[in-house]
Image: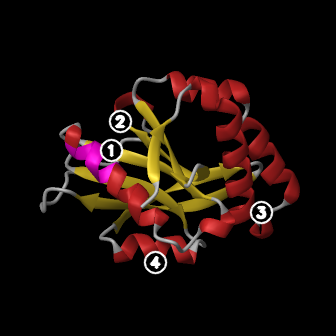
Amino acid sequence: MANLHQCTLKDLAELQHLSRVTFADTFGAANQAEDLKEYLDHAYAPATLTAELNNPNSFFYFLQEQGVTVGYLKLNIGTAQTERVAANALEVERIYILPRYKRHGYGRQLIAQAEKQALQLNKTALWLGVWEHNDAARAFYQKIGFQQVGQHVFQLGDDAQTDLVLLKSLDGGDNQL
């Protein structure tokens, strides 16, 4: 099992690199180069990531295997959430894994960390947005108990895309939308 390390500002350069590489790998081939570049330059700019790292309602974790960072997780609560999806929920904003480390169980380990963090914070659900055309991710989330409860727009450059909003109850009950 890989180790988790909570990110701080000293991890900014590595976080930026991981963000850009993993996002481009997952979404680059299916999108226009100029839209992708605009998104990467804004979403993963040092100032943007610094603000996110400094937000007390956001949590970043590097996943490391034998000293190598293979991916990361970003979680949000309260006002850091990109939107309000369910009462008392924690947002899983990013699960990013480097291409050569995909399909090695790291996604499950990151979701387990998200669940652990949510329970420590007395949250009753996890939610996330997943691109409607990311079939592998959608299948993974469905397999581990997430259900679609809505959708929202994800703006990638000039392209307004549809993300499916998925929710997983952690207390066995329904969550108020």
> Label 3 is placed on what type of residue?
Gly
In the picture shown, does residue 174 fall above or below 92? below
Determine which quarter of the picture holds residue 76.
top left
What residue is rendered at 59% in x and 71% in y? 134
Q: CA distance from mark 4 to mark 1?
A: 21 Å
Residue toward you, 35 or 91: 91
Whether residues under marks 3 and 4 lie with C-beta atoms below 8 angstroms apart, the answer is: no
- Closer to the chain start, of discs 2 and 4, is 2
- Closer to the chain start, of discs 3 and 4, is 3
Q: CA distance from mark 1 to mark 3?
A: 28 Å
> Label 4 is placed on what type of residue?
Ala
Residue 27 in picture, x, y percent from top left: 71, 63
Whether residues under marks 1 and 2 lie with C-beta atoms below 8 angstroms apart, the answer is: yes
Determine which quarter of the picture holds residue 168.
bottom left
Residue 104 in picture, x, y percent from top left: 52, 72
Query: Which is the main secondary structure of the residues drawn in magenta?
Result: helix
> Label 1 is placed on what type of residue?
Leu
Which residue is labeled 2 in the image?
77
Whether residues under marks 1 and 3 lie with C-beta atoms below 8 angstroms apart, the answer is: no
Looking at the image, residue 95 sits to the left or right of residue 69; the answer is: left
Residue 62 in picture, x, y percent from top left: 52, 45
Which residue is labeled 1 in the image?
90
- Closer to the chain start, of discs 1 and 3, is 3
Q: CA distance from mark 1 to mark 2?
A: 5 Å
In the picture shown, does residue 155 fall above or below 52? below
Q: Magenta region: which residues?
A: 114-119
Which residue is labeled 4 in the image?
139
In the picture shown, does residue 132 fall above or below 44? below
Looking at the rendered structure, the secondary structure element under dot 4 is helix
